[in-house]
Image (tube, helix red, strand yellow):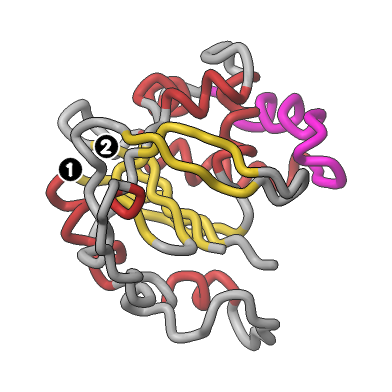
Amino acid sequence: MAIYTTYFVGTHAQIASAIPASRPPLASPVRATRMNPFTKQEVEYLSWDPADAPGAAVEQTPPLDGATIPRRSVIVIEGDYMQYLEERLPAGVRALPHFAWKSMDSIVLGTLAELLGLYPDQDAFDRAHPNLRFLDDAALNEVPRSLVDAVAALEDCREVAERWVEDETLEGSSADDVLPFLEALRALSKQCPNDRKMALLTEW
């Protein structure tokens, strides 16, 4: 299953308008249940998604503007792959500083944050990048400011890439594979002043 990841920068209002079909988080979390896909047991958790609020009547969000190919499909891509990733983005996202990549999701990003000494583990990183908006079959999270600033300040991306690929989440990848992503993330981080947020859109 393909995982598409897009990083983009804007004010909170710009991020919301870039994906108008998304739902804003609740002011306070509610208790919700969901089936664990591995144990098949229901687990209880705190949710900020309006769809989980008692008595909620939330319509399923429509496909993202620009995503012309259904998700969970076998996709044959001809031509330039980066152009394909770019053209499938919502127009509102393309209007903001951004870049698109495949499979560099919050799990991989969490290992980078841990490598840079910002968070002790993935759970701590997950708590630090809350949902900005909610969609169906997609997630829109904030990249922690501490990580944005740390990546913007990197001087030697190759040295970091060589250490990063030692993590099991990047097994089979080389420093040359992840270096272009890290350089793109650094460039975008430098375009994210304190009055802006960096958002990560993850589509399955």
Which residue is at 48% across, 59% downward? 100
Label 2 crowd (10 A; few <14 / some 14-19 / many >=20): many
Asked whether 182 or 42 is in front, the reply is 42
| Quadrant of the rendered image containing residue 63 | bottom left
Which disc is residue 197 wearing? 2
Instruction: Please tell me which of labels 1 and 2 falls first in the chain.
Output: 1
Q: Are marks 1 and 2 in contact (CB under 8 Å)?
A: yes
Which residue is at 46% across, 24% downward? 127
Q: Position of residue 152 (x, y in %)?
A: 41, 28
Which disc is residue 142 wearing? none
Q: Which residues are magenta?
A: 155-174
| Quadrant of the rendered image containing residue 32 | top left
Is 55 displayed left or right of 140 in the figure?
left
Q: Is residue 143 visible?
A: no
Type of amino acid at the residue the image marks with label 1: His
Residue at the outermost front position: 55
Is 57 displayed left or right of 110 in the figure?
left
- In the rendered view, would you say 187 is above or below 84? above
- In the rendered view, would you say 119 is above or below 188? above
| Quadrant of the rendered image containing residue 18 | bottom left
Total of numbered circles in the picture? 2
The residue tagged 1 is 12
Which residue is at 28% across, 47% downward? 54
Asked whether 188 or 106 is in front, the reply is 106
Q: Quadrant of the C terminus?
A: bottom right
Find out whether residue 30 is within the magenta segment: no
